[in-house]
């Protein structure tokens, strides 16, 4: 099985229990579901979401669309799969968005309820996040890193 096939299989498995209504309300069901997945599925979901969001609209889109609630866990998964450059970039993006340095639970609540003014009202974060996007595109091949991790550590 190729890396892309393995990732697609794991991603499909990870997302099968996600409900559409979780994306429209500021609650913890989405986060709790993803956090309860086995590590290989959790890593796949979080890493694929990050990659797709940043490639399609940048870190700004990743946070605005609510996926930034997984940022701290995603950093850990990126380190685990060996994508250290992308982990460093996400950590920098997280610090830019979480300028108040709130603990992760407060940050997640503020993000999902759109109470981070610099992101949702003033839109002051687009340019600094865009600078990170440019570096992200040239960082590690996530398909290779995640595929190798899954082939060696996942439940295939």
Image (tube, grey):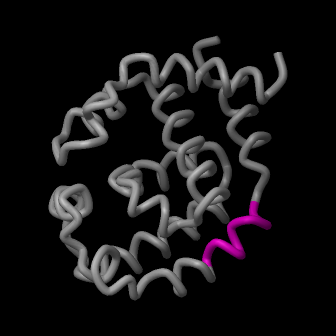
Task: Establish if 75 lies above or below 58.
Answer: above
Task: Establish if 87 lies above or below 1.
Answer: below
Residue displayed at 36% across by 25% down: 18
Question: Which quadrant holds the N terminus?
Answer: top right
Q: Which residues are magenta?
A: 132-139
Name the quadrant containing residue 49: top right
Give residue 137's position: percent from left, percent from top. 74, 65
Give residue 19's position: percent from left, percent from top. 32, 25
Task: Establish if 19 lies above or below 126.
Answer: above
Seen in the image, is 59 located left or right of residue 131?
A: left
Q: Residue furthest top?
A: 156
Name the quadrant containing residue 11: top right
Give residue 6's position: percent from left, percent from top. 71, 21
Residue 76 belongs to the span the image colors magenta = no
Residue 135 belongs to the span the image colors magenta = yes
Question: Front-most of 132 and 92?
Answer: 132
Seen in the image, is 3 located left or right of residue 90?
A: right
Identify the main secondary structure in magenta. helix
Residue displayed at 26% across by 32% down: 21
Question: Front-most of 8 and 88?
Answer: 8
Question: Which quadrant holds the C terminus?
Answer: top right
Residue displayed at 52% across by 45% down: 77
Question: Front-most of 134 and 150?
Answer: 134
Give residue 26's position: percent from left, percent from top. 18, 48
Residue displayed at 23% across by 65% down: 114
């Amino acid at each position: 099985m190729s890396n892309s096939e393995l990732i697609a299989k794991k991603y499909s498995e990870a997302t099968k229990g996600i409900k559409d209504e979780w994306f429209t309300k500021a609650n913890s069901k989405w986060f709790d579901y993803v956090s309860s997945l086995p590590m290989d599925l959790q890593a796949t979901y979080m890493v694929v979401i990050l990659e797709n969001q940043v490639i399609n609209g940048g870190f700004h889109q990743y946070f605005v669309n609510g996926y930034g609630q997984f940022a701290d866990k995603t950093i850990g998964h990126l380190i685990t799969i060996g994508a250290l450059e992308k982990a460093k970039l996400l950590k920098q993006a997280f610090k830019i968005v979480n300028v108040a340095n709130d603990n992760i639970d407060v940050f997640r609540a503020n993000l999902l309820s759109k109470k981070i003014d610099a992101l949702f009202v003033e839109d002051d974060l687009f340019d600094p996040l865009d600078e990170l996007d440019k570096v992200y595109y040239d960082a590690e091949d996530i398909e290779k890193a995640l595929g190798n991790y899954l082939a060696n550590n996942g439940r295939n």
